[in-house]
Image (tube, rainbow, N blue to C red):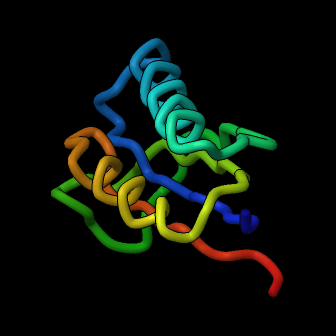
Amino acid sequence: MRDYELVAIISPEVDEEGMSKIMDRVTESINSRGGVVEETKKWGKRRLAYPIKKFMEGDYFLTRFKLMPKSVKELEGEISASEDILRYLVVKLGD
């Protein structure tokens, strides 16, 4: 398994409860693929550098996890299917 980091921007229209559900869904998705979530941090609402889907701000969260490389594409597909997630980036950590 490799170490990865996921940063996602969630629509500002989503309330606190909805934000928690999205973060839980991502955690469940990683766990169901045999991965391990090491850390999840909510960064809060921040102003965007440019509009994304007509929004100028979004709620950010960071998740650090371990997962098999072949499962990352499946995870990204599931994340991109969510309409509440405006943008996301999964980065491989270390070598």
> Image quarter for residue 11?
top left
Up the image or down, 36 lies above or below 1; here it is above
Q: Is residue 75 toward the left or the right of residue 95 in the image?
A: left
Considering the image in quadrants, where does the N terminus appear? Answer: bottom right
Name which quarter of the figure residue 40 lies in. top right
Q: Residue at x 25, y 63 (%)?
A: 52
Q: Position of residue 95 (x, y in %)?
A: 81, 87
* Near-viewer residue (26 or 17): 26
Q: Residue at x 65, y 46 (%)?
A: 35
Give how far across and how far down residue 33 sits, in percent.
52, 43
Which residue ends up furthest to the top in the rendered image?
Answer: 17
Q: What percent of the width, then of the height, locates residue 54?
A: 17, 57
* Residue 51 x/y as whole percent: 27, 66
- Count of numbered tags: 0
Near-viewer residue (82 or 51): 82
Q: Is residue 3 above or below residue 82?
A: below
Which residue is found at the position 36% from the left and 57% from the top? 74
Q: Is residue 45 left or right of residue 74?
A: right
Q: Is residue 20 above or below residue 76?
A: above
Instruction: Tell whether 76 sits left or right of 68.
Output: left
Of residues 76 and 67, which is closer to you in this image? 67
The residue drawn where x is 20% and y is 42% is: 83
